[in-house]
Image (tube, grey):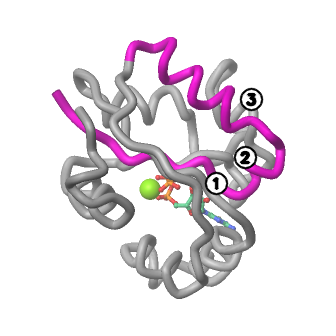
Amino acid sequence: VERTLVLAKPDAVRKNVVGKIIARFEDEGFKLVALKKLKLTKEQAGQFYIVHKERPFYDELCEFMSSGPIVAMVWEGENAIARVRAIMGATDPAKAEEGTLRKLYGSNVGENAVHGSDSVESANYEIPFFFSGLELIG
Ligand code: GTP
Ligand code: MG
């Protein structure tokens, strides 16, 4: 059983679709292990997305991710990392399949509603970034 870190990004919070995102993961059979609302500083967003620091969109990404509150959550299930990524859809909502969260709720490649860990290694960095062991209730 895997755990994966999901973020409802600032655009999803502004659009009031956090509940719909949570409901989708519940409907898909995942178990909620942790959840909190918070606002990152630009520096914290930069630490979270440190793997992208050489990418041309890094500054814009950090600016956006610190532009408003987010909702961080950990979901657990069989093959959760890959399954959550499939449910989210392609990074660019315009290229995402029908019915995916980014197609439904994303606006553009920057404001794409959700984040999901892309590997076990990423999840092992991202989950403790937001949650202590005491906050993870399996
Ligand atoms: P995450 O789950 O958020 O990590 O998305 P991803 O794994 O589908 O994409 P990737 O890790 O390659 O990029 C991380 C995030 O950077 C994306 O979700 C976008 O929000 C943002 N991003 C990627 N490409 C672009 C781009 O060309 N322009 C802008 N502004 N943002 C981008
Ligand atoms: Mg990624």
Q: Which mark is residue 104?
A: 3
Point out the tag, 3 or 1, that comes first from the N-terminus.
Answer: 1
| Residue 15 is inside the magenta segment | yes
Quarter-of-image position of residue 130: bottom left
* CB under 8 Å between discs 3 and 2: no
Q: Residues within 10 Å of mark 3 (few under 14, many from 20)?
A: some
Residue under the point 46% across and 45% down: 35
Indicate which label's residue lies in the foreground, 3 or 1.
1
x and y, in percent, of residue 18 in the image: 67, 38
* CB under 8 Å between discs 1 and 2: yes
Q: Which mark is residue 130?
A: none
Residue closest to the far left: 1
Residue range (magenta)? 1-29
> Which residue type carries mark 1?
Lys
Quarter-of-image position of residue 65: bottom right
Q: Relative to residue 35, is residue 20 drawn left or right?
A: right
Q: Secondary structure at mark 1?
A: loop
Reply above or below: 12 against 76.
below
Q: Relative to residue 113, is residue 125 drawn left or right?
A: left
Residue at mark 2: 12
Q: How many marks?
A: 3
Quarter-of-image position of residue 24: top right
| Residue 12 is inside the magenta segment | yes
Residue at mark 1: 9
Residue under the point 58% across and 51% down: 71
x and y, in percent, of residue 116 in the image: 44, 46
Indicate which label's residue lies in the foreground, 3 or 2.
2
Instruction: Name the one closer to the observer, 114 or 69.
Output: 69
Instruction: Name the one closer to the observer, 134 or 34.
Output: 134
x and y, in percent, of residue 113 in the image: 67, 46
